[in-house]
Image (cartoon, grey):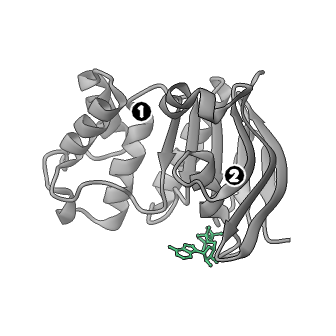
Amino acid sequence: MSVLIATQALNCERDDRLLVKQLTWSLAEGEIHQVEGPNGSGKTSLLRVLCGLSSRYSGEIYWRGQPIKTVRHQYLSELLYLGHQPGIKSVLSPRENLQWHAAVKGVVAAEAIEQALAKVGLYGYEDAPCYSLSAGQQRRVALARLFISHTPLWVLDEPFTAIDKKGVAELEGWIEQHALAGGSVLLTTHHELKLATPINKVVLGE
Ligand SMILES: Nc1ncnc2c1ncn2[C@@H]1O[C@H](COP(=O)(O)OP(=O)(O)OP(=O)(O)O)[C@@H](O)[C@H]1O
C-alpha cells in the first residue's frame, strides 16, 4: 500500500514549548494511526499542522511523496478533517450543512447527503436548525461529512465526543470499513478503541 502522508524531522512549537520533536513518520493506505498523549501534549496541534491548518512547524511534510507546498490543492482535496468542535453552522439544518460541505468540496451529492443523514441517524431532524439539536446530534452532523465525498484520508480529532454507545460502535465500524477499503485514518481519542484492525500509535509528551 502506498504512503499518503509522511513527515521528516517535524517539530511543532507552541509558546516556546516543543510539542512534537523530530517526528519522522508515515501513514499508508489502509492504515489507522492514533495520536496519543496527555491533555496539552500537542495532539490537536499536530493534527492541525498535518491538515495544513497551522504553519507552526519546521521540518517537511509530504503528500504522496511530494512536499505539501508543491501539491497543496491535491493534498487538501484528498483529506477530510473533523475538528475537536463539530464545526457546523448552527443556523443551518443538518441537510443544509451537508449541502454547504458538498459545495465546498466541489461535489454533487444530493443522494449521498440523504444516505449520510440516514446513516448517522438524523432523519427526523434533517430540516431543524442545528442550534436546536443536542451535542451528540450536532456531532453526528459533523460525522455525516465522512460520507459526502470520497476522501482517502480522514483526520479525526476526538470524534467520539458526545456520541452515545450505539454511535461509538457505529463510528468504530465506519473507521474500520474505511481502512479495509484502502482509506486511511489519523485520529486522536481518549476513548479505548475496539477495532480488529491494528492501530499504529504516535505518542506525544514522552
Ligand atoms: N489557542 C491557543 N492559544 C495558546 N496556546 C495554545 C492554544 N491551543 C493550544 N495551546 C497550547 O498548545 C499546547 C498543546 O495543545 P493541544 O490542544 O494541541 O493539546 P492536546 O494534546 O490536543 O490536548 P487535549 O488532550 O486536552 O485535547 C497546550 O498545552 C497549550 O499550551
Quadrant containing the C terminus in the rendered view: bottom right
**Where is residue 103 drawn, in percent x and y?**
27, 31
Instruction: Pick whichever of labels 1 and 2 is earlier in the sequence.
Output: 1
User: Disc 2 beta carbon < 8 A from ligand 1?
Assistant: no
Which quarter holds ligand 1? bottom right
Q: Looking at the picture, does residue 139 appear above or below residue 72?
A: below
Q: Nearer the viewer, residue 62 or 30?
A: 62
Judge from the rendering whether residue 54 lies leftward or rightward of residue 68; answer left or right. Answer: left
**Where is residue 55 drawn, in percent x and y?**
59, 54
The residue that appears at 17% across and 49% down in the rendered structure is: 93
For mark 1, give the secondary structure. Answer: helix
The residue that appears at 59% across and 26% down in the rendered structure is: 71
The residue that appears at 53% across and 29% down in the rendered structure is: 78
Task: Mark 2: give few (<14), some (14-19) or many (20+) Cα within 10 Å.
Answer: few
Task: Mark 1: give few (<14), some (14-19) or many (20+) Cα within 10 Å.
Answer: some
Q: Looking at the picture, does residue 170 appear above or below residue 79?
A: below
**Where is residue 187 drawn, in percent x and y?**
63, 51
For mark 2, give the secondary structure. Answer: loop
**Where is residue 96 drawn, in percent x and y?**
19, 42
Q: Amino acid at mark 2?
A: Lys
Residue 43, quarter of the rendered image: bottom right
Residue 178, quarter of the rendered image: top right
Judge from the rendering whether residue 162 lies leftward or rightward of residue 30; answer left or right. Answer: left
Q: Amino acid at mark 1?
A: Phe
The residue that appears at 61% across and 52% down in the rendered structure is: 49
The residue to which callout 2 is attached is 194
Quadrant containing the N terminus in the rendered view: top right
The residue to which callout 1 is attached is 147
Of the two numbered discs 1 and 2 in the rendering, the one whose residue sits closer to the viewer: 1
